[in-house]
Each structure stands twice: as C-alpha cells, then as structure tokens.
Image (cartoon, grey):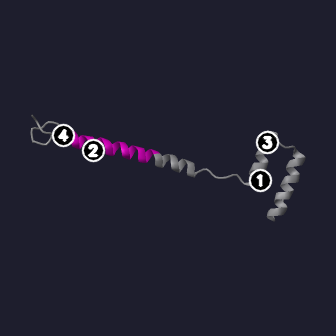
C-alpha cells in the first residue's frame, strides 16, 4: 500500500499546486473587494442645497417652496444668496 508521503510520487505535486491555486483565489478575492471598496469610497453625501435642487428638479416641491427653503438654509448657514 502506498503512503501519500513515501516518496513514490503519488500526489506529491498536488500539494504545492493546491496551495498555489488557493493563494491565487485569495489574492483575486482580496483585489476584487479592494476595488469595490474604493468605488464606494468615492460616494459622498449630498449637501442640503443639493437635495433641495434635486427635489425641485424632480417636481417634489414648487419653485416657491424651493426659494423659501433655500432662504432658510442660507440664513441658518450664514451664506448669502
């Protein structure tokens, strides 16, 4: 009967190849996850003024409501129109 490690050559190369395949798969998963993280890192939150402009553009609020809310935001933040 053959042993896996008796020097007969039976499955001797598969151990190294198996580790190589595992390392390549792990490196691929790591690099893929890093790329996704970087893409998400580019996202940023909208400012209140951007939200207000988006809501006006989508028709959620009227021009009068936009101007009223923008004036409140400008007053609270100390911005001038």
Q: Is residue 48 left or right of residue 24?
A: right
- Among the 4 quarters of the image, the one containing residue 2: top left
Nearer the observer, disc 3 or disc 2? 2
In this view, the residue in front, 20 or 39, is 20
Sequence-first tag of 4 and 1: 4
Q: Residue at x 22, y 42 (%)?
A: 15
- Among the 4 quarters of the image, the one containing residue 26: top left
Q: Is residue 17 left or right of residue 56?
A: left
From the top left corner, tell me how far across and down residue 28 is, in percent.
39, 44
- C-alpha distance separating marks 4 and 3: 65 Å
Sequence-first tag of 2 and 1: 2
- C-alpha distance separating marks 2 and 1: 54 Å
From the top left corner, tell me how far across and down residue 16 is, in percent.
22, 43
Label 1 sits on residue: 49
Label 3 sits on residue: 57
Q: Which residue sits furthest front?
A: 1
Q: Which residues are magenta?
A: 14-32
Question: The N terminus is located in which quarter?
Answer: top left
Label 4 sits on residue: 13
In this view, the residue in front, 21 or 12, is 12
């Amino acid at each position: 009967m053959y042993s896996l490690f008796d020097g007969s050559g039976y499955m001797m190369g598969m151990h190294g190849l198996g580790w190589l395949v595992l390392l390549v798969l792990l490196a691929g998963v790591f690099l893929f996850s890093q790329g996704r993280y970087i893409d998400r890192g580019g996202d940023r939150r909208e400012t209140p003024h951007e939200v207000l402009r988006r809501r006006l553009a989508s028709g959620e609020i009227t021009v009068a409501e936009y101007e009223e809310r923008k004036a409140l935001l400008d007053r609270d933040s100390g911005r001038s129109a």
